[in-house]
Amino acid sequence: MAKGGIAICGLIGVYTKQSKVSNEILSAALQSIQHRGPDSTSSWISDAHNIGLGHTRLGIIGIDNGTQPIKNEVGSIVTVVNGELYDYKRIRTQLIEQGHIFKTDSDSEILIHLYEEYGLQMFEYLRGEFAFILWDERNRTLIAARDRFGIKPLFYTQQEDAFYFASEIKALFTMGISACWDKQSLFNNFFFYPSMDRTLYQGICQIPPAHYLLITEHNYSIRNYWNFDYPKKGEFDTNSNIQLETEVIEELRKGIYEAVKLRLVSDVKVGCYLSGGIDSSSVLGIASQVYGKPLDAFTIGFHLPIFNESEVAMETATHCGAHFNLINISQNDLATYFQKSVVSLEILMENSHWVARYLLSRYVRQQGIKVVLAGEGADEVFGGYAGFVEDLKKINDVAPKSIFLKNKLPISKLYENMGYQVTNYSLSKVEETLGFIPAFLRNLIDQRAIFHSLLTDDFRYSFDDPYVSFLGQSNLTQQLKERNEVVQSFLLWSRSILTNYILVAERMDMAHSVEVRLPYLDHKLVACTTKIPADVLLKSYQEKYLYRKCVEPFVTSKVFKRKKRPFLAPPLTTKDPLYEMMYDTLSSLSISAMGCFNKNAVKRLLNDYVNTENSYVRLNLEPVLIMILSACILQKHYKISF
């Protein structure tokens, strides 16, 4: 592979108008996130002591000279970058031809010179997963930005005259920021997912995907630099034949191939996460062709056969000529590392598969691998969820067979039959707001309705409807209303569950200094897919129909024909140590200390979970209980006040 200068890392920053930045604060914050970059730690403070930037580095490429912060030739622009900027060699060559002088081999350095050349138009040239902070001394301006999909995290808080930034929230706590629940956000999270710009913690925000924070001496603002370019209603009909199918497949196949190839650039060994699904299998298949030598493939195994995909994954690895690495995760493992995983995650967990991911990345690092490719994002880009198909059937007036109820009563009705108070007023409010209820959202509203019974009256009556609250942020509702129902689902999922839950896996991997690259979340590839009508992507009402055709040459026939299975850990039994931990925690003073739960209702839920003979009910109750458990763990570990 070609050489260059990528450094994956953690970053911090302080901007203040009155007080002075201290080395002690920067050092303590960097120490708290050193797991993100154990190879080196460095910081910079301006001559006026009003700006401080820090960086922990995981060397991937250009290992000898990629230390950050990085400055321009005269030291007037300084930046710290987390992530990868692909195609940087071509851009670097162009910038050199334009007269720019480079000091390092780092891909991150192109950021400074792009800013010098194009100012805030630089984002057009950035391709990859990134978060960065840039200080321009000439204009007394600070820019903090995040990539288009939110793959790399970047949090910040404003405290009087100062702004503090960090890759993980724990670093902000270390810098002296108070740890308090954001009660509105916590309430919303029980029912849906955090907003694109909020966190669970009071006063701590996140830079939304595809946005940057611009701070000057006089004001600050959050600005958007990119959007999903889905067509608006009427721009083409869902049944329009935009191209011959074979031509579309060939174009997308080239885009996927290029996205994988770009993400294989590294001076260290590269591996792949591998399940039994088509997404990770196709990434390994393409990567194996490009790489030219055997890759390492890493797979999780569980004790229950229905959750264990190792046999199919091993066949794929053999087919691709990859070295197959299997880590078997036991129920004891899930309990032992649950708390550490929650602390690393910093959000509410819904399934213990996060613990498995935590242990997988640890195992990868133990094998000497720093970089892996994975298949996340394909479902969002190409329509891989059953709910998208249901929405397409609805707009085409095809009677759907419910994918969620499976001839059962809605789960909220079963909750009611068990004696729980359930309020589904959100359904009508969402429909009133959008004119439509996405199938996945209808299912989520139904499942989470039980939280109305688990929260104290004072808490649950203090806040507005969580779904309408989410839709009300920025101009999201307007973007949704301008597009057809299937595109609404794509957009809503990508700006909620993808960003604020699926992609948070980054913190599981970086807990062990493992960088995961996601070819399917390449914005140029996504730009191609957004021009394709939903009924072409989901032809014959098949999930990811077009995508499957694109990657068919790179996977086995078994994987190509295999139905999608979500990555979940096996359900808990009363004999599992994780259930014992959950029972002990939720029956203790911890639940009272949260301040928002009805302790008797939660205890009753624990008993009902054990005693119910309805596996469908238990399947829906487990994520609720794990969310409550993870909230208690976060509160205790970070000493969060309520």
Image (cartoon, rainbow, N blue to C red):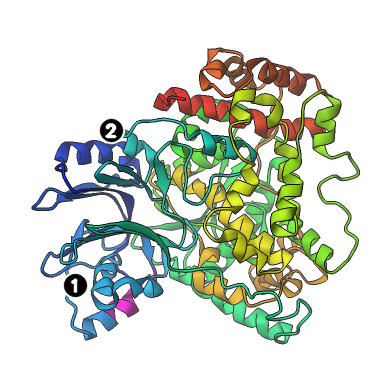
Residue 614 visible (yes or no): no
* Start-end of magenta stretch: 86-93
Percent of width and height locating residue 132: 32, 58
Percent of width and height locating residue 305: 73, 40
Q: Which of labels 1 and 2 is toward the front?
A: 2
Question: Vertical placement of 506 versus 344: above or below?
Answer: below
Residue occupied by mark 2: 176
Residue 262 lies in quadrant:
bottom left
Q: Cα distance, mark 1 to mark 2?
A: 37 Å
Residue 371 falls inside the magenta stretch:
no
Percent of width and height locating residue 602: 67, 20
Q: Residue at x 33, y 46 (%)?
A: 166
Q: Is residue 84 left or right of residue 383?
A: left
Residue occupied by mark 1: 102
10 Å crowding of disc 2: few (<14), some (14-19), many (20+): few
Main SS, magenta region, reads: helix
For the residue pair 69 and 413, the one nearer the viewer reads as 413
| N-term-proximal mark, 1 vs 2 | 1
For the residue pair 19 and 81, the one nearer the viewer reads as 19
10 Å crowding of disc 1: few (<14), some (14-19), many (20+): some
Q: Residue at x 61, y 77 (%)?
A: 252
